[in-house]
Amino acid sequence: MGDTTRELLLQRGATTPENLVRAEAESARTGRPLTSQLLVMGAADERALAAVIAERHGVPGVDLSRSAIPTAALELVPRAVAETDGILPLSTEGGRLHIAVASPADAERVLPEVRFVTGMEVSTYLAVQESLRRAIAGAYEALARGEPEWRGFAASGPAGQLDVVIPGDLRLPEGDEVIEVADGDLEPLGEADEALAPSPTGEAPIEIAIGDGDEEVVHQVSAGAEPSPGDRRRVLVVDDEPEIRMLVERALTSQGYEVETAADGEEGLAKVQAHPPDLVLLDAMLPKMHGFEVARRLRSDPRTRPVPIVMMTAIYRGWRFAQDARETYGAQDYIEKPFRLDDFHRRVEAVLEATASRGPAKGPSAEPLFQKGKELLLAGKLDDAVAALDEALRLDPFMAEAHYQLAKAQRARGEHFRAMTAFERAVELRPAFFPALRSLAALYTEKGFRRKAAETLERALAAAPDATTKDAIKSDLLELLGA
């Protein structure tokens, strides 16, 4: 991985030394990347250039001149965005969006936005910049004409076939066969603009001033009648702003709730784990541990998974963040600050009513379906195993082990990119899930994502259960980095 593009061009015979010297001079004059300049000059084949780029960066390459791209994939990214950001959607194979970019830096810049806008996991491939520019223009013109696909000038394969170039041919051992770690053996997870009307009781309201930027908003909270202790539901408020904690605590207390507070993510997580409340009101932006990370850890732990979560935020605004908070982090609701206290009370009550029957012993359990799926997988009945595991995850989408077993079944069926997504979800829910990390690294390597494979092996190294396994992973990592 340490070789420069120039060295690799010569080592791999992608061009001659004479052409390389000419291309370097022209590149300095035109500002084009060296590989693009060689392509414009006709001094190197695009596939050879894509192979050099892929090897240089440890990311799969794509020869666009030999690829056929279904135009339906282009509808996920507007043409103006594609041209401005240098993105070409390639396909939606396996439920993922595959895109071409010109460099890893471009990928890091656009990947979060593409994932956020499309709602899909994204795999990136590197292309020669000049070819990418031409392909973006040609493919979107084909889409505008209503054509089902765009084909590069040298494409000869079937519809939708991409000419992907894999960097190196290193194959890691299959992670599923390395070691099985039981749950108990795993390393624990560790890293309002309008006031309420006065109460009908006639008691004087409590006034609380909350600073929101340059504005100060006064909220009135009625004291209300104190209910009997047996009727009090317990709410944990996790927020780093003392004024918000005071406002929410007094507002909820006035409605008969028992309230605890925490000032940062670590304290909030510890309090839930020690004594799960009936509801967690969780600020998204917290010190020590981010609110979304707190939510993820609560959902990944079977003991705290049933606890309903309402996220509160002044930063992450809009329906897409709300949707991600619900689908990815298991939040029951998402409240933007500043909020109306009457609306706040209504939404808290709605969540508590909707989740009143939740709990480990109530409602259908995902565990029997999960166990059935594992047994079917061991018996080689892949379709039935996938169906059972899918149903288990419908009941409990935060079961990391079920995502892992589903990935194994999908991989066995040849659905590599679906398996990749399921492995990723498993390690997102449980960062130290060693078998899933090892399997994911193997799959990344197999599909040519060498850089992501190395990052995942580094995580697997930290999660390895013993010294022998650590040494084996170090060996794999050194081999991968030196490939």
Image (cartoon, helix red, strand yellow):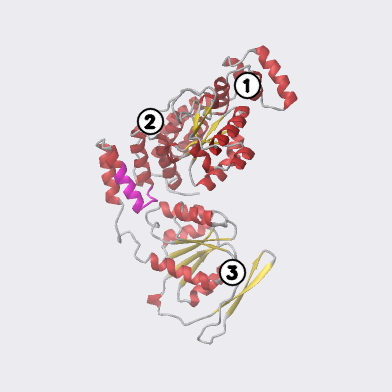
Question: Which region is colored magenta?
Answer: 386-399
Q: Are marks 3 and 1 in contact (CB under 8 Å)?
A: no
Q: Is residue 464 visible?
A: no
Q: CA distance from mark 3 to mark 1?
A: 58 Å
- Along the polypeptide, which appears first: circle 2 or circle 3? 2
Q: As shown in the figure, which amino acid type bears the numbered disc 3?
A: Ala
Q: As shown in the figure, which amino acid type bears the numbered disc 2?
A: Glu
- Residue 469 found in image quarter: top left
Q: CA distance from mark 2 to mark 3?
A: 53 Å
Seen in the picture, residue 2 relative to 187 is either above or below; the reply is above
Task: Looking at the picture, tell me which residue is in the foreground, 18 or 287.
Answer: 18
Magenta span contains residue 389: yes
Mark in the foreground, 2 or 3:
3
Q: Which residue is mark 1?
A: 39
Q: Is residue 38 visible?
A: yes
* SS for callout 1: helix
Q: In the image as oriented, which residue stretches furthest toward the bottom?
A: 202
Task: Looking at the picture, tell me which residue is in the foreground, 268 or 252.
Answer: 252
Magenta span contains residue 106: no
Point out residue 7 in the picture as x, y percentages from the top left corner: 62, 19
- Along the polypeptide, which appears first: circle 3 or circle 1? 1
Point out residue 404 in the picture as x, y percentages from the top left corner: 37, 42
Q: In the image as oriented, which residue stretches furthest toward the left?
A: 379
* SS for callout 3: loop
Local packing at callout 3 (Cα closer than 10 Å; few below 14, some 14-19, many 20+) is some
Residue occupying the point 39% across, 44% down: 186
Q: Which residue is mark 3?
A: 192
Q: As shown in the figure, which amino acid type bears the numbered disc 1?
A: Leu
Q: Which mark is residue 174?
A: 2
Give the side of residue 15 with respect to residue 426, left or right. Answer: right
- Quarter of the figure that contains the N terminus: top right
Point out residue 188 in the picture as x, y percentages from the top left corner: 42, 48
